[in-house]
């Protein structure tokens, strides 16, 4: 049976996130590195954006035109103050920021998945089937596809 989610007002979501023990602070503009193909303006400098964090992970959210929550910078693990991009190279997942890249451990992936689920539940954002199964990557780069 399909579980219906109701989009909640932005201010109500911020209050609920505080009650769920999320750290809510104004977005600093130090966001994650952009995946290939993304525009430089995506997710940067959104007015009213806040950074939500818990479990060592963070995301940036902002109000959209309908005064509901819009995820500006997707959830990721925080490394050196930046929200890392989850990079899948086929054999291993990596956490990548503008300065460093490390191999993602099972603990990192569990934290990102749990954070993402709790954030979407609080915001009234529907959880897609493939995302509910486990952590999905932001970028897929396979060596065997180079040069094709």
Image: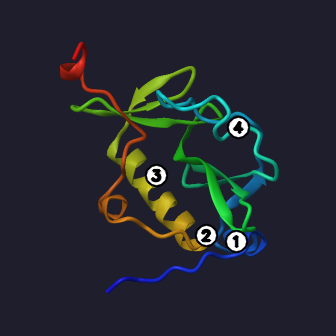
Residue 20, percent from left and from top: 64, 72
Of tags 1 and 4, which is closer to the observer? 4
Residue 41, percent from left and from top: 68, 33
Q: Tell me the element at label 4.
A: loop
What residue lies at 74% left-to-right and 76% top-to-bottom? 12
Q: Label 1: few (<14), some or many (≥20) within 10 Å? A: some
What residue lies at 77% left-to-right and 53% top-to-bottom? 25
Q: Earlier in the sequence, mark 4 or mark 2?
A: 4
Q: Which disc, if any, is residue 44?
A: 4
Q: Residue beneath label 1, please?
A: 13
Q: Nearer the viewer, residue 58 or 48?
A: 48
Q: Earlier in the sequence, mark 1 or mark 3?
A: 1
Q: How many marks?
A: 4
Q: Residue beneath label 3, please?
A: 112
Could you say which quadrant of the image residue 34 lies in? top right
Q: Which disc, if any, is residue 123?
A: 2
**What is the C-alpha distance between the residues marked 2 and 3?**
16 Å
């Amino acid at each position: 049976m399909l579980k219906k989610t109701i989009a909640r007002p932005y201010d109500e979501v911020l209050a609920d996130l505080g009650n769920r023990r999320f750290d809510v602070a104004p977005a600093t503009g130090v966001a994650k590195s952009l995946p290939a193909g993304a525009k430089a303006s995506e997710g940067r400098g959104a007015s009213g954006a806040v950074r939500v964090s818990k479990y060592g992970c963070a995301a940036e959210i902002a109000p959209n035109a309908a005064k509901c929550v819009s995820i500006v910078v997707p959830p990721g693990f925080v490394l050196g103050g930046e929200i890392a991009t989850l990079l899948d190279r086929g054999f291993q997942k990596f956490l990548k920021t503008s300065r460093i890249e490390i191999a993602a451990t099972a603990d990192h992936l569990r934290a990102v998945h749990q954070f993402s689920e709790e954030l979407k539940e609080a915001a009234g954002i529907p959880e897609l089937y493939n995302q509910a199964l486990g952590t999905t990557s932001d970028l897929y780069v396979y060596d065997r596809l180079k040069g094709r």
